Every structure is written in C-alpha cells, then in structure tokens.
C-alpha cells in the first residue's frame, strides 16, 4: 500500500470539480473518482480492481501521469473505461483479435493508456510477475506504486530501455 506522503504529493495536481484547468501546463493532471464510480466499474466486471489501483483512484483519481510528455498520452484510465476495455465494449471491441484477447483475459488488468492503438500498460494478475506492471509483455515495475514513482521522475523510463 502506498504511503500517504507519496500520493499526497500528487494531490496538488487534482483538478477540483467544476474547475477548468489547462492540463498541458502541468506535469500531472488528475480528476477525482468517487467510490460510487469505482463500484459501478467493478460491478460491470464482477470483480474488484487491484488494491493499489483502487487506492490510487480513491486518493488521487484518474488522469494524466506525466502530461508533460508530448509523445505519449500517459493516462491513468477512468475506471469505467477500463471496464469497457476488459469487456470489449464500444470501440475497444474493434481492436485486433489478439490484442482484445490479451486485454480481456483474466491474467492482466489494463489501467494506463499510452495513447497508441491498443497500447496499454497492464497489471499482471497471476504467475511469476504477479502484481508487476507490464509493457509489451515485459515487466517495467515490480508493483503499481513503484511504477507511479518512476513515472513521476521520468515518464518514458521504460521505452527502448532494457530493465533488470
């Protein structure tokens, strides 16, 4: 579980409800997620979201983690969008069959949109890398909080680099 201080540093980037902010002028930009919104998404999936992700949503919200990177969207997806992706609803059902099968499987939990077509980071839900964050099938962080910390320092830390 994340330390309050860690997520506390990100709370300064939460946009108060009813406020208009130009997110591109900030390193991060988040929008609150209510417990009802999270519960609705979990009901759609008939499963709870991973604990660290749930905590992040309720403490910080969804939005842009590293919005200052012009090459990637870096969007922590809204809970309902994750549910739609996991269920193959709306335009998510139009992705390549192999991608759709991967993101809808019980082995992974997509949560982060890099902005490309079917380009999502996932939480591994079982196996050797359980709890790890994966990019293109390889681990880039051992857990969600480590991923958030690394993204706060360097938003493209995992692109084109070999991680150990």
Image (cartoon, rainbow, N blue to C red):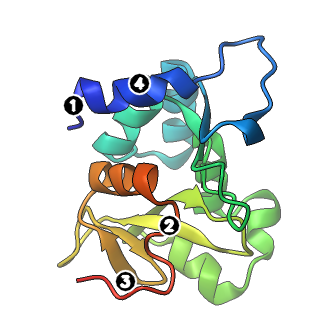
Residue wearing tag 2: 121
| Left or right: residue 122 compared with residue 90 | left
Quadrant holding the C terminus = bottom left
Mark whose residue sits in front, 1 or 4: 1
Residue wearing tag 3: 138
Q: Are discs 2 and 1 less than 8 Å apart at CB?
A: no
Real-space CA distance between mark 4 and mark 2, rounded to the nearest whole angstrom: 20 Å
Question: Residue at point 48% right, 39% down?
Answer: 42
Q: Secondary structure at mark 3?
A: strand
Query: Counting residues from the N terminus, which is met first, the one under dot 1 or under dot 3?
Result: 1
Mark whose residue sits in front, 1 or 3: 1
Query: Counting residues from the N terminus, which is met first, the one under dot 4 or under dot 2?
Result: 4
Residue wearing tag 4: 59
| Left or right: residue 95 compared with residue 44 | right
Q: Are discs 4 and 2 less than 8 Å apart at CB?
A: no
Query: Counting residues from the N terminus, which is met first, the one under dot 1 or under dot 4?
Result: 1
Query: Can residue 111 be seen?
Result: yes
Real-space CA distance between mark 1 and mark 3, rounded to the nearest whole angstrom: 26 Å
Q: Give above or below for 74 relative to 105.
A: above
Query: Can residue 48 be seen?
Result: no
Question: Residue at point 58% right, 24% down?
Answer: 14
Q: Are discs 4 and 3 less than 8 Å apart at CB?
A: no
Quadrant holding the N terminus = top left
The disc placed on residue 22 is none
């Amino acid at each position: 579980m994340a330390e309050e201080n860690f997520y506390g540093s990100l709370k300064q980037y939460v946009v108060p409800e009813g406020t208009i902010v130009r997110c591109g002028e900030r390193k991060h930009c988040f929008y609150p997620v209510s417990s009802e919104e999270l519960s609705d998404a979990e009901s759609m999936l008939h499963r709870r979201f991973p604990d660290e992700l749930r905590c992040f949503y309720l403490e910080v919200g969804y939005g842009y983690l590293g919005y200052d990177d012009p090459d990637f969207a870096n969007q922590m997806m809204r809970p309902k969008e994750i549910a739609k992706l996991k269920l193959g609803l709306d335009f998510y059902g139009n992705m390549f069959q192999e991608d759709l099968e991967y993101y809808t499987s019980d082995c992974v939990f997509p949560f982060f949109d890099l902005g490309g077509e079917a380009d999502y980071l996932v939480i591994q839900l079982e196996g050797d890398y359980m709890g790890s964050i994966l990019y293109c099938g390889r681990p880039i962080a051992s857990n969600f909080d480590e991923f958030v910390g690394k993204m706060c320092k360097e938003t493209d830390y995992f692109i084109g680099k070999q991680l150990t």
